[in-house]
Image (cartoon, rainbow, N blue to C red):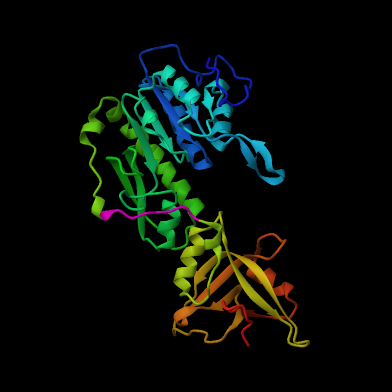
Amino acid sequence: MLASSQMLRRFCCSSSSSCCVSQSTKKKQLVFLGSPQVSASVLDALFNASSAPDSLFQIAAVVTQPPSGRNRGRKVMPSPVAQHALDRDFPSDLIFTPAKAGEDVFIANLKALEPELCITAAYGNILPSKFLKIPSLGTVNIHPSLLPLYRGAAPVQRALQDGAKETGVSLAFTVRALDAGPIISCERMEVDDHIKAPELLELLFNRGSELLIRELPSIFDGSAMVNAKPQDESAVTLAPKITPEESWLSFDEAASVLHNKVRAFAGWPGTRAKVVVWDQKSGQQSVIELKIITTRIYSTNNNQSYETDEVIYTKGSLLIPCGGGTTLEVTEVQPPSKKVMSAAAFWNGLRGQKLKKYSQAGAVLA
């Protein structure tokens, strides 16, 4: 058992569990690094594969982000990966949570395990050279894009924002340059026009888990390293981290651009817009901020478009005029301090008041 300031507090663990580390030296020692829920699916696949009678490896340690405040009340909780490892009765003293992957104590503990291979899946921490030198077979990353496309922190979100019709998942060796290592294998996937980022992330990491398990024998025998293909640097695109400031929608843009942004930013940070609530009887107007949850690109058989600044309600949807004569159809919203609701429920709550767009210059449109 290792002693480290970066370890989670010890939890009860069954020493007889098949998930606990075997004393056998015949199997390859594998270390997994990941943090969010999508990474937990990869860890689960590795646990299942490692418990097979003919398994080539055992999980020597799990590395994840430190516990943090999550959910209501901001209660400090283990990462989803750490929690999944604990739920599978993995020894808590082999779950490492360094603030940075280059910390001396963590590096010393990792070296002591003598891992042949490290696997990363949305770990969320930069791996320094002194880390990458430790595993004899290298470090392999599951990246949810078709590398060299969308290198960076938000590949799925940026692909959806761009309206990509195809994406995929890549298995690649990790090097110091961002997502630039040789590619072991990849799988392509068509992108549905209505799928949102959290759903697509889950699908891609599930595919990535299957791809990883299939490729592990070639990684362990060294042939994957020999056959891995360098990336085409001339085809590189980047997927920078999303910021909260990007969440605002401008109805001056085309409906297709806004629809893709709603899909891409679903979950976090979400998308929001200002609208004007207008009481025709009193003439009073107020500006409210709506979170836009679910949308479609509005179309009719006769290519009708709405050339008004008024938001129209029809057949369960809010129709918002956008740039280029296009119209965004909004089916779910979240008003301030309320839960997500259908457009119909929101419209009924207006009690006869009208909606209009809010100008980007800060003035209410007449």
Let me know if residue 238 is in the magenta part: yes
**Left or right: 179 in relation to 91:** left
In the image, 51 versus 4, the foreground residue is 4
Farthest residue in the front direction? 104
Q: x and y percent of residue 355 in the render?
A: 65, 79
Identify the residue at image location x=39%, y=29%: 131
Identify the residue at image location x=70%, y=46%: 72
Q: Which residues are magenta?
A: 235-242
Q: Is residue 55 visible?
A: no
Task: Judge whether 310 appears above or below 60 on screen.
Answer: below
Q: Is residue 198 visible?
A: yes
Q: x and y percent of residue 284 in the render?
A: 75, 83
Identify the residue at image location x=37%, y=17%: 27
In the image, 160 versus 152, the foreground residue is 152
**Left or right: 202 in relation to 332:** left
Let me know if residue 221 is in the magenta part: no
Q: x and y percent of residue 163 in the render?
A: 40, 63
Identify the residue at image location x=56%, y=54%: 268
Q: x and y percent of residue 206 in the render?
A: 43, 42
**Left or right: 200 in relation to 220:** right
Task: Judge whether 205 appears above or below 306 on screen.
Answer: above
**Occupied quadrant, residue 285:** bottom right
Farthest residue in the left direction? 226
**Occupied quadrant, residue 92:** top right
Task: Judge whether 118 appears above or below 235 on screen.
Answer: above
Q: Quadrant of the C terminus?
A: bottom right
* Type of secondary structure dominating the magenta stretch: loop
